Structures are given as C-alpha cells and as structure tokens.
Amino acid sequence: MWLFFALLSALFAALTSILAKLGIDGVNSNLATAIRIVVVVVMAWGMVFLTHAQNGIFSLGRKSWIFLILSGLATGASWLCYYRALQLGDASKVVPVDKLSVVMTLILAFVFLHEDFTAKSLIGCILIGAGTLVMVL
C-alpha cells in the first residue's frame, strides 16, 4: 500500500510544480508560498477532522512536538526556496535539482537514523546525481 501512496505523492508533486509555474507568473514568490500554505493548512486540518484524529493532539509528547515543529520550519524554508527558484528558472530544470532531496535524504537517514546505506543506495545516488546534472546542463 505504501507504494500506491508514494506514486500518488509523486504525481501530486509533479502537478504541484506545473500548477505553481503557471500560477506564479507576476506574483511575488513569498506571497505565492503563503497562499499555498493556507490551502495546505485548511486541507490538512480538514482531513484531521474528517478522520476524527483531532484528539491525538493531546497525546503528543515533547519530542514529537519539537521534531514536528522543526519539520514544519524545514518545509516552509523548502517551499519558499522552491517557489523562488520556480519563478527564476524553468520548471524542467528546477524540479530535477529539487529532487536531489532524495540523495540528501538517503545520506541523512544513514547518518541520523542509522538506516542501511547499501551498494544499491550508493549506485542510486550516483545515478540520480548524474541524471540531475544531465538534465540541468
């Protein structure tokens, strides 16, 4: 089931890039990011209430709060940079560079989460890096 949702995530991420590039023309990138965030907040809280998950907020521990807040800050920074990059560059070049996050995630997961970094992971990272370089040049 995770693969199904991961593929949907990739599809929606692709749509996000195209729709953002179409909508950002002549709009301040920070304003565009703020509008996107409001839509995401409304949608996310809608899903929380739709699935009756709102009571879970009271059972979150200190560690969860800290890391969820830090994750939110990282997401916000990522979106601000992403929208600015989309405004300045071609989506066909910005998106592949943004997807270097896959390589960075694998490295960070190895360092901080002690996940396996196999030969297959290394080859994948090299191929993603090389593919990104080819697409950007």
Image (cartoon, helix red, strand yellow):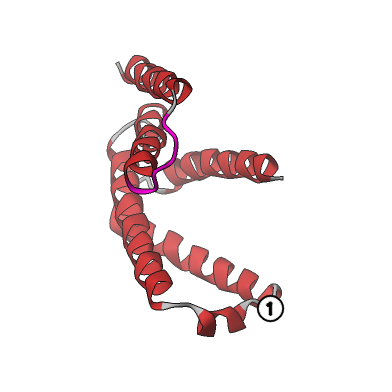
Residue 43 position by quadrant: bottom right
Residue at 32% from the left image edge and 20% from the top image edge: 136
Relative vertical location of residue 118 with respect to residue 18 in this rendering, above or below: above
Residue 28 visible to the viewer: no
Magenta span main SS: loop
Is residue 17 among what the camera can see?
yes
In this view of the protein, which residue sits in the foreground, 75 or 14? 75
Q: Position of residue 6 (x, y in %)?
A: 61, 42
The x and y percentages for residue 76 are 34, 59
Q: Is residue 71 left or right of residue 4?
A: left
Front residue of 96 and 107: 107
Query: In the drawing, does residue 17 fall left or right of residue 67?
Result: right
Observer-nearest residue: 44 or 107? 107
SS of the residue under disc 1: loop
Name the quarter where the C terminus is drawn: top left
Residue located at (35% from left, 33% from top): 94
Residue 16 is a magenta residue: no
* Front in this rendered view, residue 116 or 33: 116
**Measured from the top left, where is residue 103 in percent x and y?**
37, 32
Which residue is rendered at x = 42% and y = 35% of the image?
102
Magenta stretch: give its range. Answer: 112-117
Number of disc labels? 1
Q: Residues within 10 Å of mark 1 (few under 14, many from 20)?
A: few
Q: Amino acid at mark 1?
A: His
Q: Which residue is mark 1?
A: 52
Q: Above or below — where is 36 with respect to 20? A: below
For the N terminus, the image quarter is top right
Residue 131 screen position, x and y as percent: 40, 17
